[in-house]
Image (tube, helix red, strand yellow):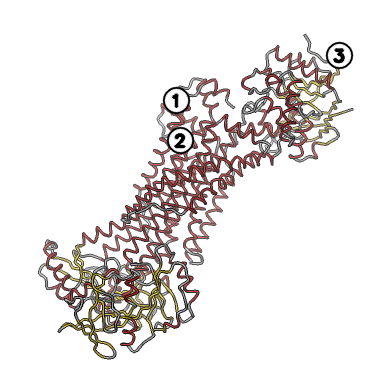
């Protein structure tokens, strides 16, 4: 490269400029690496969090005809990556008899010893069942029946009564993945034989490895299945977990996308300044016969070299920053980080990204360098940049908004997946940065009026300097626009969603005490427990109890999709309904429920197209019943994939009798006194009694964990923004050395120069904050609209002045702090050197 | 034989940018320059002399008329071809020297050859020869900021000569120098014309500098007011 030595000399002569450029790339690459690794840590934390609810992640294979199918129909799946185990399952309702006690139960046929060997089923005591007359019982069920290992129990089957020996007791939580709520485990061949269905299975559960991506495995499995079989994510706990993961993933994707955009602005800005500062030198080379191609080539090669250096430094810094962030996120999600791991691919991509982004960012400055006016090379001072901006910025921004709106519309119409809204959101943000040069003059001059009169001169000059470089100012401000938009947009989206969930819980669980099946909190597996139907009557008899509402839950299928069916006592008139029915008032909803009509969760409606007025077939325990849909409900139970009916309808339509949850409201002042009798009652029925406050705190912990993790990543955005601004202001000072020297030479004091630089930076921060506020509100709307297909309903957005003020304040503070060092440097310039600087 | 010809060139600034009324800096200027001529273009500030020089050097294009250098019409060249022409056939000297501060004097002088892809050793050798020609070879490895203004201008002249250009264009080359250094620079240019038959076109507002030329064109209000051939050998008037 002919101009290589010129580059090297320039770096040696102006190391500050070269270092600032490298630092920009390093900050950008570091931000992307840190955000990416932190987002991965969050995803992994969410996964562990949801696995704790769901059990091991799995998918389920069932017959399209909603009936049993032969295991012979199942193709070989063992070679699909990410599979941990393939478990055929056979269920049948049964009755257990111990002495005079009879308990209705769901028996599960499974290869028990294999499950135990693979660690998928944990026995608290005893051995797995192997022989046809052996049974493993749920630990809670066994306790309530007062059975232990070695005891015998009578089991009613199609072929009569069979005496079974209890060989082991299973931990309730580990049964959740397979049991469909049942507490009785029998060897699969024995159970299917007892049901005269040898060789048939109800479903096949495919358990995934922890690092497998469920959607990918689901696709691979579905591809192999014959037309008579289908694969899906199991209903109940799993779908809730999956939806939580999707929504959180979308948020993380937004943060990562915006961080990449912010990094892009930082690098483009650095490259632009790097070239602009040398404009005169480049013009001179051009004057001496350098071709435009030679100059472009030189600038691009320089960008690549600085990019490589920046990427090396940035990747290292990013990993260093990611470690505490990941640990913090893991802590917030209550999923301790045992070992800090990251995908090396991230580092490689970042290493490539550095030079690639630097070169891409340098392309426009390089092109401009090639087109530099020759007369600039011989001018005493560079000509003032053209003031004002053309209409093209505005048109460009409007075009980008139109593109983003079209993508959003396509997402809403479900023509493209919700994830496509991430690049669209980034495009929207670019448009906000695009209109920055258009609105900046008004914003900046408006802000200058707020500066105290005693600093008016500094403020005016700062404003003028900002206005002289509209494009560069837009890019600097762009970093802040993105950071503030990130903070306000995601902050609103997170708070609105969290409030929505908490409001739902508040409405759904109005009680002082909850009595729930073990392991069911927040997940609701269906029926289990002896004499469960009687527990609500017993609870009502406890002194101090004002009201008892019982909820029964079962897994089932509606319109061919796995779902949960929820049957709940209706509170008396005037007490409010625990359902948030869309478009119906309480009286209409109550009448519909009393008629035996059903309400369908928004997510289930979204998945199946079920609409109010439809009659749908709902299958529970192998029994299919038609039910009329009265309306849709916003629902967080099982992620909204649920059918809600009155308790009476649950009994008569689906035989859904066993109680999953009891909501107990105490007579005022008696809540604490209910603890002992409720715990005793729960104990006798293999259930748990929890206070509402305890439940609330558990929900708060989960919610705060997710909010905390997203906040950590947002904070990272602000840190990156501040580094970007600090770097830009430093480069600005370097570039304006001559101007600042001239100002000093005509009598400006060092204090005034310091204030000038700081005010200039604050103006940028405030302008970025103001524009970013609009960007943030748009982002919040964007996230909420784009997550509608995931959630099945629109989340109400509410403006939060506190959050906006916090972000605006942070932007101004960050820029003021970031400008301090460059300002000090500017105030200490050597006058002679400064005014002779080119 | 004419090395350079300005054929009725005019230049209006501002008209390209869509201004309602442009500023006409040069109006219908025509002249030719023969090989070995030392032409001085003089005039007061704003007379259009520098604009004429810029058009002669292909730095800016005439609004009308054409410039022909060694038979090549500059209007027919695109920007890249013009760059090659400037690199190989035109040498520039400016009032503020315009040396790249990052490079040594020798590297500055070698730059046009480097841009042309010549071998590095050749470039160094040619640069040293050019510096020797202007009496600056002993300062070859100094940076511009470590030598005086007069020495910087000598190095700038060496850079203009290193490609053995058809014409050397100098824009107020003594404008930033004291009288002693001015005299040295003009003597150097005169010597080039006399000894090497180098063609030099110089713009100046200083009559003593113009007196060293073999021909003087005086400009006023963008037009040639006077074109005089001086009947004496080049040299600096005392």
Q: Secondary structure at mark 1?
A: helix
Quarter residue B4 falls in: top right
Horizontally, is B50 left or right of A797 in the view? right
Give the class, few, some or many, for how many residues have Cα within 10 Å of label 1's Cα (few <14, many ≥20): some
Outermost residue to the left = A543
**Which chain's residue wears label 3?**
B
Answer yes or no: are tags 1 and 3 on the same subunit: no
- Tell me, yes or no, if residue B12 can be seen here: no
Quarter residue A454 falls in: top left
- Indicate which disc residue A522 carries: none
Query: Mark 2 or mark 1, which is nearer the start of the sequence?
Result: 1
Question: In the image, residue A317 lies at what x, y percent?
Answer: 45, 43
Find disc 3 in the rendering and name its residue: B232
**Which chain's residue wears label 1?**
A
Q: CA distance from mark 1 to mark 3?
A: 60 Å
- Indicate which disc residue A752 carries: 1
Give the class, few, some or many, for how many residues have Cα within 10 Å of label 3's Cα (few <14, many ≥20): few
Give the class, few, some or many, for how many residues have Cα within 10 Å of label 2's Cα (few <14, many ≥20): many
Horizontally, is A135 left or right of A3 in the view? left
Q: CA distance from mark 1 to mark 2?
A: 14 Å
Q: CA distance from mark 2 to mark 3?
A: 63 Å
Nearer to me, A664 or A88: A88
Nearer to me, A663 or A178: A178
Find disc 2 in the rendering and name its residue: A761
Question: In the image, residue A95 lies at what x, y percent?
Answer: 23, 84
Quarter residue A530 falls in: bottom left
Outermost residue to the bottom = A159
Question: In the image, residue B38 lies at what x, y percent?
Answer: 82, 21
The N terminus of chain A sits in image quarter: top right
Looking at the picture, does residue A677 appear above or below residue A462?
Answer: below
Looking at the picture, does residue B144 appear above or below residue B118?
Answer: above
Query: In the image, which is nearer the foreground, mark 1 or mark 3?
Result: 3
């Amino acid at each position: 490269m002919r101009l290589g030595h010129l580059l090297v000399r320039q770096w040696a002569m102006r190391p500050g400029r070269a270092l600032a450029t490298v630092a920009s790339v390093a900050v950008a690459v570091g931000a992307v690496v840190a955000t990416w690794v932190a987002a991965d840590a969050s995803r992994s934390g969410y996964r562990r969090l949801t696995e704790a609810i769901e059990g091991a992640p799995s998918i389920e294979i069932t017959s399209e005809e909603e009936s049993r199918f032969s295991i012979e129909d199942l193709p070989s799946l063992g070679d699909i990556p990410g599979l941990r185990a393939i478990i055929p399952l056979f269920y049948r309702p049964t009755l257990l008899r111990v002495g005079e006690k009879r308990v209705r139960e769901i028996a599960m046929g499974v290869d028990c010893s294999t499950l135990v060997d693979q660690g998928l089923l944990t026995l608290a005591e005893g051995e797995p069942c192997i022989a046809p007359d052996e049974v493993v019982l749920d630990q809670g069920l066994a306790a309530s029946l007062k059975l232990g290992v070695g005891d015998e129990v009578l089991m009613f089957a199609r072929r009569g009564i069979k005496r079974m020996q209890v060989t082991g007791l299973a931990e309730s939580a580990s049964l959740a993945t397979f049991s469909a709520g049942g507490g009785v485990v029998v060897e699969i061949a024995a159970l299917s034989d007892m049901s005269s269905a040898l060789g048939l299975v109800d479903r096949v559960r495919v358990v995934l490895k922890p690092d497998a991506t469920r959607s990918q495995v689901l696709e691979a499995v579905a591809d192999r299945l014959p037309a008579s079989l289908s694969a899906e994510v199991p209903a109940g706990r799993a779908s809730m977990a999956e939806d939580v993961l999707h929504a959180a993933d979308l948020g993380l994707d937004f943060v990562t996308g915006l961080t990449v955009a912010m990094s892009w602005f930082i690098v483009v800005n650095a490259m632009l300044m790097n070239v602009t500062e040398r404009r005169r030198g480049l013009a001179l080379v051009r004057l001496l016969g350098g071709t435009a191609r030679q100059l472009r080539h030189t600038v691009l090669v320089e960008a690549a070299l600085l990019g490589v250096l920046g990427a090396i430094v940035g990747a290292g810094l990013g990993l260093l920053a990611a470690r505490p962030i990941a640990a913090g996120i893991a802590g917030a999600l209550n999923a301790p980080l045992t070992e800090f791991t990251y995908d090396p691919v991230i580092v490689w991509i970042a290493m490539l990204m550095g030079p690639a982004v630097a070169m891409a960012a340098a392309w426009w400055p390089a092109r401009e360098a090639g087109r530099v006016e020759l007369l600039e090379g011989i001018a005493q001072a560079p000509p003032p940049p053209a003031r004002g901006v053309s209409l093209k910025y505005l048109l460009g921004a409007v075009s980008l908004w139109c593109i983003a709106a079209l993508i959003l519309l396509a997402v809403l119409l479900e023509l493209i997946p919700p994830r496509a809204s991430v690049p669209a959101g980034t495009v929207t943000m670019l448009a906000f940065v695009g209109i920055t040069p258009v609105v900046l003059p008004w914003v900046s001059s408006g802000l200058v009026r707020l500066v105290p009169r005693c600093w008016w001169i500094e403020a005016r000059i700062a404003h003028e300097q900002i206005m002289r470089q509209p494009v560069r100012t837009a890019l600097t401000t762009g970093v802040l626009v993105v950071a503030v938009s990130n903070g306000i947009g995601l902050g609103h989206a997170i708070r609105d969603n969290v409030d929505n969930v908490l409001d739902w819980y508040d409405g759904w669980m109005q009680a002082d005490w909850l009595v729930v099946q073990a392991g069911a909190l927040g997940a609701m597996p269906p029926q289990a427990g002896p004499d469960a139907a009687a527990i609500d009557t017993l609870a009502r008899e406890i002194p101090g109890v004002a009201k008892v509402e019982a909820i029964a839950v079962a897994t089932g299928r509606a319109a061919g999709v796995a779902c949960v069916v929820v049957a709940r006592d209706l509170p008396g008139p005037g007490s409010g309904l625990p359902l948030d029915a869309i478009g119906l008032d309480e009286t209409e909803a109550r009448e519909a429920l009393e008629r035996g009509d059903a309400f369908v969760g928004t997510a289930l409606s979204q998945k199946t197209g079920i609409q109010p007025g439809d009659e749908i077939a709902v299958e529970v325990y192998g029994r299919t019943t038609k039910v009329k849909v009265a309306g849709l409900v916003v629902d967080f139970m099982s992620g909204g994939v649920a059918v809600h009916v009155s308790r009476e309808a649950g009994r008569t339509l689906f035989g859904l009798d066993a109680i999953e949850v009891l909501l107990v409201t105490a007579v005022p002042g008696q809540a604490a006194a209910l603890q002992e009798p409720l715990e005793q009652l729960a104990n006798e029925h293999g259930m748990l009694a929890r206070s509402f406050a305890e439940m609330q705190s558990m929900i708060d912990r989960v919610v705060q964990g997710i909010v905390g993790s997203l906040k950590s990543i947002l904070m990272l955005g602000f840190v990156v923004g501040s580094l970007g601004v600090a770097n830009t202001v430093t480069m600005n000072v370097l570039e304006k050395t001559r101007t600042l020297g001239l100002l000093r030479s005509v009598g400006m004091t060092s204090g005034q120069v310091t204030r000038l630089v700081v005010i200039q930076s604050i103006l940028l921060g405030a302008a970025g904050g103001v524009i970013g506020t609009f960007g943030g509100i748009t982002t919040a709307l964007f996230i909420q609209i784009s997550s509608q297909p995931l959630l099945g309903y629109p989340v109400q957005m509410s403006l939060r002045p506190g959050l906006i003020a916090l972000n605006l304040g942070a932007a101004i503070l960050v820029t003021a702090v970031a400008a301090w060092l460059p300002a000090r440097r500017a105030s200490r310039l050597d006058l002679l050197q400064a005014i002779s600087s080119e | 034989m004419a090395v350079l010809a300005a054929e009725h060139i005019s230049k209006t600034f501002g008209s390209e940018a869509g201004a309602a009324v442009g500023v006409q800096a040069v109006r219908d200027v025509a002249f030719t320059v023969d090989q070995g001529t030392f032409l001085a273009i003089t005039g007061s500030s704003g007379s259009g002399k520098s604009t004429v020089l810029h058009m002669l050097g292909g730095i800016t294009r005439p609004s009308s008329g054409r410039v022909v250098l060694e038979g090549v019409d500059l209007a027919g060249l695109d920007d890249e071809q013009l760059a090659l022409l400037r690199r190989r056939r035109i040498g520039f000297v400016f009032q503020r020297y315009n040396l790249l501060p990052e490079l040594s004097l020798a590297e500055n002088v070698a730059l046009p050859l480097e841009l042309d892809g010549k071998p590095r050793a050749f470039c160094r050798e040619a640069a040293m020869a050019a510096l020797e020609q202007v009496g600056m070879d002993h300062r070859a490895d100094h940076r511009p900021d470590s030598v005086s203004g007069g020495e910087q201008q000598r190095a700038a002249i060496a850079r203009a000569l290193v490609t053995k250009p058809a014409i050397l264009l100098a824009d107020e080359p003594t404008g930033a120098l004291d009288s002693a250094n001015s005299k040295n620079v003009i003597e150097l240019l005169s010597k080039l014309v006399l000894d090497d038959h180098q063609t030099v076109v110089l713009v100046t507002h200083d009559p003593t500098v113009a007196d060293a030329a073999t021909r003087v064109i005086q400009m006023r209000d963008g037009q040639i007011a006077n074109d005089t051939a001086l009947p004496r050998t080049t040299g600096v008037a005392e």
